[in-house]
Amino acid sequence: MISRTFIRYVLTKLFFLVVTYLVSITIVFLLPRLIPGNPLAQLLTQLFQQAQTNPETIKEVYRTLMNQFNLDKPLWEQYLDFLIRAIQGDLGTSIAYYPRKVVDLIMPAIPWTLALLVPATLTAWFLGNNLGAIAGYKRNSLFERVVLTTSLVISQIPYYWLAMVLLYVFSVKLGIFPSGGGYSYGSVPSLSLTFIVDFLWHYTLPFLSIVLVSIGGWAIGMRLLVIYELGSDYMIFSESLGIKESKLFSYAFKNSLLPQVTGLALSLGGALGGQLITETVFNYPGTGFVLFRGLSTLDYPMIQGVFIIIVATLFLANFLVDLIYALIDPRIRLGYAQT
Amino acid sequence: MSSGLLNVIDVAAYYKQQVGASVKTIKAVDGVDLFLYEKEILGIVGESGSGKSTLAHVILMNIKKPLEFIRGTVRIYTGNNFLNLNSMSIEELRARVWGKEIALIPQSAMNALMPTLKIKRIILDIVKSHQDKVNEEDVIEKATKRFRELGLPEKAIDMYPFELSGGMRQRTVIAVATLLNPRILIADEPSSALDVVSQRMVLKTFYDLFRKNIIKSMIFISHDIATVRQIATDMCVMYAGKIVERGPTDDLVKRPLHPYAEGLINSIPSVEPEIRKRKLRYIPGQPPDLSNPPTGCRFHPRCPYTMDICRTKEPPALEVERKHLVSCWLYARR
Amino acid sequence: MKIIVYLLITNKRFIAGVSVFLLIVFIGLIGPLLYPVDPLSFAGPMEMPPCGRYPLGTDTYGRDLLAQILVGTRTSLYIGFLTALIAISMGTIIGASAGIKGGIIDEVLMSITNVVLAIPSILLAILIASYIKVRSIEVIALLLGITGWPWYARAIRAQLMSLREREFVYLSKMAGYRDIELAFKDLLPNIATYTFMAFVLYINGGILSEAGLSIIGVGPTKGISLGLILQWASLMEAVRRGLWWWFVPPGAIITAITSSLMIVSVAMDEIFNPKLRGK
């Protein structure tokens, strides 16, 4: 029973995402060329000067980059070239790790980032929603006050600082967890049990630092939603017909969950940003770490590449969540506009 | 007489609002007596702010902050014994009374159904909350039959509320509320937001429920006397938190005793010849502020027949004719 | 008005939050004056834990950490405040124009807003910051403000759109200016309270984002902020080497600022939004 409204909804979201993605790419393209001082040109000049006194490799780098950035061609030609390359999956060549391609450096990091982002966000979402719902239902109870105050404080802790504290306490002082990396030095990633255990052992602290901070945000939001739900006409009617309290709670919970699904899409962007920085604290081999290395060496192709790929991944994830929402809200699925 | 289904005795409920440092008390229902017998449809009429909806909630004892129950007794008859609703806890009320003995159809009933649940889910939840062992197919079958009885399309049960039109939604709410055959049905402004045709159908639904003995008695709350009159067997008029007159519908409409009731009925254009004979009038002034109601009879500031005693003492309920009671000093000299 | 002030003062959360925040502001403003040690002088012993002479110890370069924290607090607060100012200004202008003018202007502005909103702001900020060689504190604040205004613009637009509707109703009744004035008076308190709460949230966002930028290496290139202290600490592997006095205080203060402001914001939300009071 897929209605026209559903299709329209999906297409609208898709269109919006494609447009926004193109805008992002355009921003990436224009920025270095527009900022006073034109960093790209500066970089290339730097390299050129270095090439005078250094061996062939730098000359190679310079030539490749000139080729990629085409700073001597008119702007629109550069743009077209950039777009075509991007669609083909060529995001340029890294400067710091020449001659490796940017895409080749970033892609392996993506599964690591997703492995952290998805479970952490979902866990926080799940736990936070439950805590928040119960807090909203039991108003003016000790439970509510504790949950609210704790959430308010914990949700404002910077992920990366909590990461540092956890690292210090559990790794340096107590020695329970390793002090960084995605897996033990020297081991090779594989699907063997020993590797997985090793991975999880390294994974715990980064996971915790993200989950603990995120739970608070979801709890606060859910509590608010449940409070509003409980005051709605249909809740009052259902109650006046004698429906059991546990049922009423599940009504409020399910209805409040819908906007929280939308919220999930919205929060992914912010969570990703925070996670990237957290990865650097742990030397966790995700895209955040790659970005960090790019930033410290001012490897612009790398920085740009990370941005584009992360934005693309994010948009895809957003779209998936929007799709799921469209399927679970009967009002959209069956084709009725907002009542 | 023990065919009395509902006894409401000297019931009062106030709204307590925190305004800055002080608490404002609004005496929405202030000493109301009500009796409902089997096979009666009682209409409660009055202006907005007279306390009608609050009274409905008090009868059900569904009282939430900022409303507070001050005093009184609410007693219902459940077929083999009496229950004092005012001394029961919410859990008990939920389990034994709400939906089962009494059902309330709230104002703006169109939003009363959960938009994200199919109607049959709501039905099943109501039944499961009152019965331990539930055979789902059985329930759906019975519900479908009931829908058919009330002239509602059977497939409505499998739909979502937003898929139904306004009038149909209203009638579905009525069907859902009366599923467990509550003895007493209270409807709060059930037809006010509907077009005339839907209004008619809603009234017919109520009448069907009544005729088929699905409900025993009904309380119909509205500000629209013309509509109430069509279905109610008895009427009572509410003003400023008190009931000022009560009697059989025809008696009350043809010969209203209380000056307020008189003014109310005369202010409604009607095709009835007896009423057309009287001129169309309106009641001057405004309803009183219930946080500081007038002394004595609450209507005295607007009453054309005010006497000295009206300003100082509240009139008791007096039976002027058979089953026709009024609270007015005009009728005290007998 | 008096009622609102009364409700605010008696709300425990509000008082607690405001007290903590004001305390920190005090520390940031007056602190460096009361403790006039040069945070950047390499005078002290290296990596010394807290002791009498150096209440918060020293870092790898022998710099007094307490002095750093005091100046850093001031700077971070400044950045947060500036970010909020810029974001609110931009958001109000754009949101108000869209909400009041309507039509094409609304469509265009909203499209832009939605697109910017969809792009993760911190990533955008990192990207832009990486291109700028010299990043002063003000530049960072400007950057964060420019990447953060969208959600507020949308909210303001929504509030003002209801004003527009009323305007048409009144005009059609030919009631004249007075009713528009009344409608405005009705909305202004709503908008004012919302703006205040948004301002508070932006301060939080600004401080947290600046710290994030700093840690990853694209923070301010001059000055000392709490985020920069954390960056120096992580560059010197302070965590793994157990120099807790270096990285714990800056983060703790950030958390104190942001959580106290958050509590204030929630308390205010409860007061201005009667539905939530639940008394």
Image (tube, helix red, strand yellow):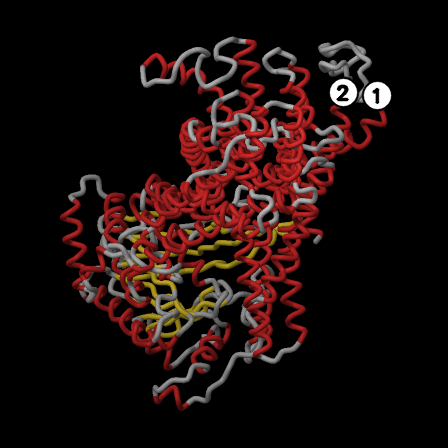
Chain designation of label 2: C
Chain designation of label 1: C
Q: Secondary structure at mark 1?
A: loop
Mark 1 vs mark 2, CA separation in Å: 9 Å
Q: Quadrant of residue C254?
A: top right
Q: Quadrant of residue A247?
A: top left
Task: Report the residue at 66% width, 28% height from top.
Answer: A52
The local crowd at label 1, few if under 14, some if 14 to 19, many if 20 or more residues have their Cα within 10 Å, is some
Q: Which residue corresponds to mark 2?
A: C66
Query: Does the rendering let one see residue A211?
Result: no
Q: Which residue corresponds to mark 1?
A: C37
Q: Tell me: residue B113, above or below residue C255.
A: below
Q: Secondary structure at mark 2?
A: helix
Please provide percent x and percent y for residue A179.
52, 14
In this view, the residue in front, C34 or C216, is C216
| Image side of residue A283 versus residue B24, left or right | left
Label 1 close to label 2 by CB (< 8 Å): yes
Name the amino acid type tagged 2.
Answer: Leu
Residues flagged by tags 1 and 2 on a common chain: yes
Task: Report the residue at 54% width, 71% height from top.
Answer: B299
